[in-house]
Amino acid sequence: MTESEYRKLDQPRAEAAIREFLYAIGEDPDREGLLETPSRVARACAEIFAGLQENPADHLKKQFHEADHEEMVIVKDIPFNSMCEHHLLPFSGRAHVAYIPRKGRITGLSKIARCVEGFARRPQVQERLASQVADALMEALDPLGAIVVIEAEHMCMTARGIRKPGSLTVTSAVRGVFKEDQKTRAEALALFRD
Ligand SMILES: Nc1nc2c(ncn2[C@@H]2O[C@H](COP(=O)(O)OP(=O)(O)OP(=O)(O)O)[C@@H](O)[C@H]2O)c(=O)[nH]1
Ligand SMILES: [Zn+2]
Protein backbone atom coordinates (compact mmCIF):
# COMPACT_ATOMS: atom_id res chain seq x y z
CA MET A 1 0.00 0.00 0.00
CA THR A 2 1.34 3.46 -0.85
CA GLU A 3 0.96 6.50 1.42
CA SER A 4 -1.79 7.94 -0.80
CA GLU A 5 -3.87 4.80 -0.36
CA TYR A 6 -4.18 5.15 3.43
CA ARG A 7 -7.65 6.49 4.07
CA LYS A 8 -10.03 6.80 6.97
CA LEU A 9 -12.92 4.39 7.32
CA ASP A 10 -15.90 5.68 5.34
CA GLN A 11 -18.45 5.81 8.17
CA PRO A 12 -21.66 6.34 6.10
CA ARG A 13 -20.66 3.62 3.66
CA ALA A 14 -19.77 1.18 6.45
CA GLU A 15 -23.08 1.91 8.21
CA ALA A 16 -25.06 1.26 5.02
CA ALA A 17 -23.16 -1.99 4.45
CA ILE A 18 -23.79 -3.21 8.00
CA ARG A 19 -27.46 -2.35 7.76
CA GLU A 20 -27.62 -4.38 4.54
CA PHE A 21 -25.67 -7.20 6.18
CA LEU A 22 -28.16 -7.36 9.08
CA TYR A 23 -30.95 -7.68 6.55
CA ALA A 24 -29.05 -10.39 4.67
CA ILE A 25 -28.65 -12.59 7.76
CA GLY A 26 -32.41 -12.47 8.34
CA GLU A 27 -32.57 -9.69 10.90
CA ASP A 28 -34.73 -6.59 10.94
CA PRO A 29 -32.31 -3.64 10.97
CA ASP A 30 -35.22 -1.41 12.02
CA ARG A 31 -36.03 -3.20 15.26
CA GLU A 32 -35.24 -1.12 18.31
CA GLY A 33 -32.21 -3.06 19.55
CA LEU A 34 -30.46 -2.80 16.19
CA LEU A 35 -31.14 0.84 15.35
CA GLU A 36 -27.75 2.09 16.51
CA THR A 37 -25.86 -1.09 15.58
CA PRO A 38 -24.66 -0.03 12.11
CA SER A 39 -23.10 3.15 13.47
CA ARG A 40 -21.64 1.29 16.47
CA VAL A 41 -20.13 -1.46 14.31
CA ALA A 42 -18.71 1.09 11.89
CA ARG A 43 -17.01 2.91 14.77
CA ALA A 44 -15.69 -0.38 16.12
CA CYS A 45 -14.32 -1.21 12.66
CA ALA A 46 -12.42 2.07 12.55
CA GLU A 47 -10.60 0.81 15.64
CA ILE A 48 -10.27 -2.85 14.60
CA PHE A 49 -8.89 -1.89 11.17
CA ALA A 50 -6.94 1.18 12.25
CA GLY A 51 -3.79 -0.35 10.76
CA LEU A 52 -5.17 0.37 7.27
CA GLN A 53 -4.88 4.05 7.99
CA GLU A 54 -1.15 4.10 8.65
CA ASN A 55 2.13 2.52 7.69
CA PRO A 56 2.91 0.55 10.88
CA ALA A 57 6.59 0.44 9.89
CA ASP A 58 6.78 4.21 10.46
CA HIS A 59 6.83 3.64 14.24
CA LEU A 60 10.28 2.11 13.85
CA LYS A 61 11.67 5.38 12.52
CA LYS A 62 12.12 6.56 16.12
CA GLN A 63 15.70 5.41 16.60
CA PHE A 64 18.59 5.75 18.98
CA HIS A 65 22.23 4.88 18.93
CA GLU A 66 23.65 2.70 21.67
CA ALA A 67 27.44 2.45 21.51
CA ASP A 68 27.87 -0.33 18.96
CA HIS A 69 25.47 -2.64 20.78
CA GLU A 70 25.20 -5.85 18.78
CA GLU A 71 23.38 -8.10 21.27
CA MET A 72 19.93 -9.54 20.88
CA VAL A 73 16.97 -7.32 21.79
CA ILE A 74 13.78 -9.20 22.61
CA VAL A 75 10.24 -7.98 23.14
CA LYS A 76 8.04 -10.96 23.82
CA ASP A 77 4.46 -11.75 24.82
CA ILE A 78 3.05 -8.77 22.95
CA PRO A 79 -0.69 -9.40 23.01
CA PHE A 80 -2.60 -8.58 19.83
CA ASN A 81 -6.02 -8.91 18.24
CA SER A 82 -6.36 -9.29 14.51
CA MET A 83 -8.99 -10.31 11.96
CA CYS A 84 -8.61 -13.31 9.70
CA GLU A 85 -9.15 -12.04 6.20
CA HIS A 86 -10.84 -15.26 5.07
CA HIS A 87 -13.78 -15.15 7.46
CA LEU A 88 -13.48 -11.70 9.08
CA LEU A 89 -13.39 -13.40 12.45
CA PRO A 90 -10.91 -12.50 15.19
CA PHE A 91 -7.66 -14.25 15.81
CA SER A 92 -5.68 -13.23 18.82
CA GLY A 93 -2.61 -14.21 20.68
CA ARG A 94 0.92 -13.07 21.36
CA ALA A 95 3.83 -11.95 19.24
CA HIS A 96 7.48 -12.43 20.14
CA VAL A 97 10.01 -10.25 18.38
CA ALA A 98 13.81 -10.23 18.46
CA TYR A 99 16.47 -8.46 16.47
CA ILE A 100 20.22 -7.95 16.64
CA PRO A 101 21.10 -4.30 16.04
CA ARG A 102 23.84 -3.38 13.62
CA LYS A 103 26.37 -1.03 15.20
CA GLY A 104 24.05 0.09 17.98
CA ARG A 105 21.16 1.19 15.77
CA ILE A 106 18.10 0.53 17.94
CA THR A 107 14.45 1.62 18.14
CA GLY A 108 12.17 2.33 21.11
CA LEU A 109 10.81 -0.89 22.62
CA SER A 110 7.22 0.35 22.53
CA LYS A 111 7.66 1.05 18.82
CA ILE A 112 8.05 -2.67 18.18
CA ALA A 113 4.73 -3.32 19.93
CA ARG A 114 3.16 -0.43 17.98
CA CYS A 115 4.39 -1.96 14.75
CA VAL A 116 2.84 -5.35 15.66
CA GLU A 117 -0.38 -3.59 16.62
CA GLY A 118 -0.55 -1.68 13.34
CA PHE A 119 -0.09 -4.73 11.13
CA ALA A 120 -2.50 -6.74 13.31
CA ARG A 121 -5.25 -4.17 12.92
CA ARG A 122 -5.88 -5.09 9.32
CA PRO A 123 -7.57 -8.02 7.58
CA GLN A 124 -4.73 -10.51 7.94
CA VAL A 125 -3.35 -14.01 7.70
CA GLN A 126 -1.07 -14.97 10.53
CA GLU A 127 1.89 -15.83 8.29
CA ARG A 128 1.83 -12.38 6.69
CA LEU A 129 1.57 -10.64 10.06
CA ALA A 130 4.86 -12.25 11.12
CA SER A 131 6.58 -11.45 7.80
CA GLN A 132 5.44 -7.84 7.73
CA VAL A 133 6.82 -7.17 11.21
CA ALA A 134 10.12 -8.89 10.40
CA ASP A 135 10.47 -7.06 7.08
CA ALA A 136 9.63 -3.71 8.69
CA LEU A 137 12.42 -4.25 11.23
CA MET A 138 14.91 -5.26 8.54
CA GLU A 139 14.06 -2.24 6.44
CA ALA A 140 13.92 0.36 9.21
CA LEU A 141 16.96 -0.70 11.23
CA ASP A 142 19.10 -2.75 8.86
CA PRO A 143 19.82 -5.10 11.79
CA LEU A 144 22.00 -8.21 11.61
CA GLY A 145 18.78 -10.18 11.76
CA ALA A 146 15.19 -10.28 12.95
CA ILE A 147 12.83 -13.05 14.06
CA VAL A 148 9.12 -12.90 14.77
CA VAL A 149 7.09 -15.76 16.24
CA ILE A 150 3.33 -15.48 16.55
CA GLU A 151 1.04 -17.78 18.52
CA ALA A 152 -2.67 -17.28 18.06
CA GLU A 153 -6.09 -18.82 18.36
CA HIS A 154 -8.38 -18.35 15.37
CA MET A 155 -12.07 -17.96 16.02
CA CYS A 156 -12.77 -19.31 12.54
CA MET A 157 -11.30 -22.59 13.81
CA THR A 158 -12.83 -22.53 17.27
CA ALA A 159 -16.35 -21.09 16.91
CA ARG A 160 -17.27 -22.48 13.49
CA GLY A 161 -16.05 -24.88 10.81
CA ILE A 162 -13.74 -27.49 12.31
CA ARG A 163 -14.49 -26.18 15.88
CA LYS A 164 -11.27 -26.94 17.67
CA PRO A 165 -11.14 -24.59 20.67
CA GLY A 166 -7.72 -24.37 22.24
CA SER A 167 -5.86 -25.18 19.03
CA LEU A 168 -2.94 -22.81 18.66
CA THR A 169 -1.36 -21.74 15.37
CA VAL A 170 2.32 -20.82 15.51
CA THR A 171 4.02 -18.99 12.64
CA SER A 172 7.43 -17.44 12.30
CA ALA A 173 9.41 -15.15 10.06
CA VAL A 174 13.18 -15.41 10.19
CA ARG A 175 15.59 -12.94 8.58
CA GLY A 176 19.35 -12.38 8.38
CA VAL A 177 21.57 -13.99 11.00
CA PHE A 178 18.60 -15.85 12.55
CA LYS A 179 18.13 -17.61 9.24
CA GLU A 180 21.82 -18.28 8.62
CA ASP A 181 22.88 -19.31 12.10
CA GLN A 182 20.99 -22.14 13.75
CA LYS A 183 22.51 -21.37 17.19
CA THR A 184 21.35 -17.74 17.17
CA ARG A 185 17.88 -18.83 16.09
CA ALA A 186 17.75 -21.47 18.83
CA GLU A 187 18.81 -18.87 21.40
CA ALA A 188 15.96 -16.55 20.40
CA LEU A 189 13.42 -19.37 20.39
CA ALA A 190 14.55 -20.49 23.85
CA LEU A 191 14.26 -16.92 25.19
CA PHE A 192 10.77 -16.63 23.66
CA ARG A 193 9.78 -19.79 25.56
CA ASP A 194 11.22 -18.87 28.99
N1 LIG B 1 -2.75 -20.03 6.43
C1 LIG B 1 -3.73 -19.41 7.09
N2 LIG B 1 -4.96 -19.86 6.99
C2 LIG B 1 -5.93 -19.23 7.69
C3 LIG B 1 -5.69 -18.14 8.51
N3 LIG B 1 -6.86 -17.76 9.07
C4 LIG B 1 -7.80 -18.60 8.59
N4 LIG B 1 -7.23 -19.50 7.76
C5 LIG B 1 -7.79 -20.62 6.99
O1 LIG B 1 -8.32 -20.21 5.77
C6 LIG B 1 -8.92 -21.34 5.20
C7 LIG B 1 -10.04 -20.95 4.28
O2 LIG B 1 -10.46 -22.15 3.72
P1 LIG B 1 -11.75 -22.30 2.77
O3 LIG B 1 -11.90 -23.75 2.45
O4 LIG B 1 -11.65 -21.31 1.66
O5 LIG B 1 -12.91 -21.77 3.73
P2 LIG B 1 -13.94 -22.61 4.63
O6 LIG B 1 -14.82 -23.43 3.75
O7 LIG B 1 -14.63 -21.64 5.52
O8 LIG B 1 -12.96 -23.57 5.44
P3 LIG B 1 -13.10 -24.23 6.89
O9 LIG B 1 -12.56 -23.21 7.87
O10 LIG B 1 -12.21 -25.43 6.82
O11 LIG B 1 -14.53 -24.54 7.16
C8 LIG B 1 -9.32 -22.22 6.39
O12 LIG B 1 -8.56 -23.40 6.32
C9 LIG B 1 -8.90 -21.39 7.61
O13 LIG B 1 -8.49 -22.18 8.71
C10 LIG B 1 -4.34 -17.68 8.60
O14 LIG B 1 -4.02 -16.71 9.30
N5 LIG B 1 -3.40 -18.35 7.89
ZN1 LIG C 1 -10.57 -17.58 9.09
Image (tube, rainbow, N blue to C red):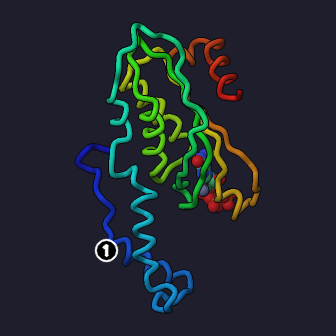
Is the residue marked 1 within 8 Å of ligand 2, measured from its CB?
no
Position of 120 relative to 97 (above/below): below
Task: Check disc 1 and report the residue beneath it.
Answer: 12
Position of 17 relative to 98 (above/below): below
> Can residue 20 be seen by looking at this rendering?
no
- Residue type, numbered disc 1: Pro
Q: Where is residue 100 in the image (x, y as percent from the top left)?
A: 49, 16
Tell which of 120 and 79 is nearer to you: 79
The residue positioned 46% from the left and 91% from the top of the image is 30
The residue positioned 35% from the left and 20% from the top of the image is 64
**Residue 193, image quadrant:** top right
Q: Quadrant of the N terminus?
A: top left
**Residue 42, image quadrant:** bottom left
Position of 25 relative to 179 (above/below): below
Position of 34 relative to 143 (above/below): below
Q: Position of residue 77 (x, y in %)?
A: 61, 37
> Can residue 99 be seen by looking at this rendering?
yes
37 sits to left or right of 14: right
157 sits to left or right of 150: right
Mark 1, Cα crowd under 10 Å, few <14 / some 14-19 / many 20+, is few
